[in-house]
Image (cartoon, grey):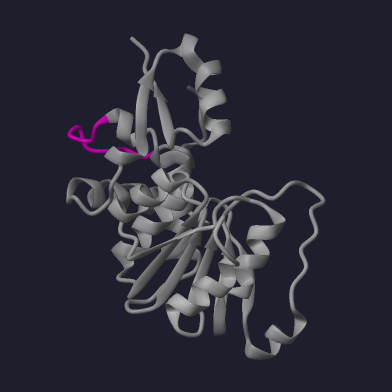
Amino acid sequence: MLIHEHACVAIPKEMPLDRAALMGCAVTTGVGAVINTAALRPGETIAVIGCGGVGLAAVNGAAIAGAGRIIAVDVVPAKLELARRFGATDVIDATEGDVATRIIELSRGGVHHAIEAIGAKTTVEQAFASLRSGGTATVAGMLPQGAKIELEAFRLLDECRLQGSRMGSNRFPTDIPRYVDFYLQGRLNLDDLVSRHIRLEQIDEAFVELRRGETVRSVVMFD
């Protein structure tokens, strides 16, 4: 594959390639949104809305960064259980009650950080509404072009902030080797991100499963 030199990073031979394949997008986006963009500090609280590949990586990134409490939110019970394996201390089923209210109750006043990992108007608004004074909501999901977001303006007086994150504010030459080290040290859970291995001819089937929310990541294997 022909790529720009800035996107080419050497990795150790002991790094499994099917796990390394995850780092170029989901892991870089999720972990980076927490560590680079949000710059979460040890002991701070965080909510992650959406537990797909990006969201689970964000949960894991928060655990690595030393978050005091990690609240994972999703509508699929299996993904909430999976989030616990990535480091979530609490989980919220988004189909049961108001998400922001429940996050505020669990965190006793709102979280320092909220990561939106879906890319939807409603969940971005929920992330912002779940913040404590001075908190920051970071949008890691990709919103549709032209989407509009409504926020409670008074929260701006509480110095609450809303910001975007493009691929986890990544710095590939330094971030990828760091994430590889995290995996080899047992701190970054890539194994549970791989739902299954498929052949290229199964790609349409994999897209259907992805749209249904049945898998986290399918890895295409080539001979």
Residue 63 image offset from top left, x and y in percent: 31, 63
Question: Magenta stretch: residue 12 in it?
Answer: yes
User: Does the rendering let one see residue 22?
Assistant: yes
Residue 27 image offset from top left, x and y in percent: 41, 47
Where is the C terminus found, in terms of image quarters?
top left
Judged from this view, the residue extending furthest toward the front is: 96
In the image, 120 versus 94, the foreground residue is 94
In the image, 75 versus 110, the foreground residue is 75
Residue numbers of the magenta segment = 9-16
With 11 as the anchor, is 83 left or right in this view?
Answer: right
Image quarter for residue 41? Answer: bottom left
Judged from this view, the residue extending furthest toward the bottom is: 157
- Residue at 32 percent across and 29 percent down: it is 18
Question: Magenta stretch: residue 11 in it?
Answer: yes
Residue 9 image offset from top left, x and y in percent: 37, 40
Seen in the picture, residue 7 relative to 135 is either above or below; the reply is above
With 223 as the anchor, is 48 left or right in this view?
Answer: right
User: Does the rendering let one see residue 171?
Assistant: no
- Residue at 59 percent across and 51 percent down: it is 141
Residue 173 image offset from top left, x and y in percent: 39, 49
